[in-house]
Image (cartoon, rainbow, N blue to C red):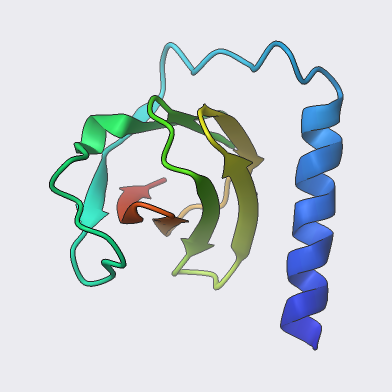
């Protein structure tokens, strides 16, 4: 029940953040750490060979992770984990768009897992 409550809270915060200006998504950062996003072949509800990792781009700058969906992959759930501290952040996107996730900025090893209707993607970066 606690995980469900945290998921609902994360979704609510994400919707409130997007409600501020839903027609103009923030631009991706022009500097910072590029985060490569790759298809995850271990989770594959549908074949991924029609999609390229360029369907999703991500970048980190000043405690903000920006995830850009360049293709409509359906509903996407994004989970970011600092494996060094155990902190975790979640967000959701539907179709093409941009998700911005404010992270703590703590040093560590970060993993990104994105689950879409077209399959799963992952990425990683170090702060």
Callout count: 0
Horizontally, residue 94 falls left or right of residue 3, namely left
Q: Could you say which is closer to the camera, residue 119 or residue 63?
A: 119
Horizontally, residue 109 falls left or right of residue 42, namely right
Q: Could you say which is closer to the camera, residue 59 or residue 15?
A: 15
**Does residue 106 show up?**
yes
Residue 85, percent from left and from top: 54, 70
**Residue name at image x 83 percent, y 75 percent:** 5
Residue 109, percent from left and from top: 38, 59
Choose top left, top right, bottom left or bottom right for residue 8: bottom right
Residue 52, percent from left and from top: 19, 36
Q: Could you say which is closer to the camera, residue 98 or residue 112?
A: 98
Choose top left, top right, bottom left or bottom right for residue 35: top left
**Does residue 103 show up?**
no
Q: Is residue 4 above or below residue 56?
A: below
**Residue name at image x 41 percent, y 15 percent:** 31
Q: Quadrant of the C terminus?
A: top left
**Residue name at image x 77 percent, y 20 percent:** 22
């Amino acid at each position: 029940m606690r995980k469900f409550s945290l998921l609902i809270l994360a979704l609510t915060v994400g919707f409130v953040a997007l409600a501020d200006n839903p027609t103009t998504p923030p631009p991706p950062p022009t500097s910072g750490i590029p985060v490569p996003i790759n298809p995850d072949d271990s989770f594959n509800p549908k074949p991924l060979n029609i999609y390229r990792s360029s369907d999703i781009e991500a970048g980190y700058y000043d405690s903000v992770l920006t995830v850009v969906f360049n293709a409509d992959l359906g509903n996407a759930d994004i989970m970011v984990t600092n494996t060094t501290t155990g902190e975790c952040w979640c967000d959701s996107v539907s179709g093409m768009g941009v998700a911005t996730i404010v992270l703590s900025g703590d040093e560590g090893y970060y993993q990104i897992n994105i689950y879409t209707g077209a399959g799963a993607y992952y990425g990683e970066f170090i702060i």
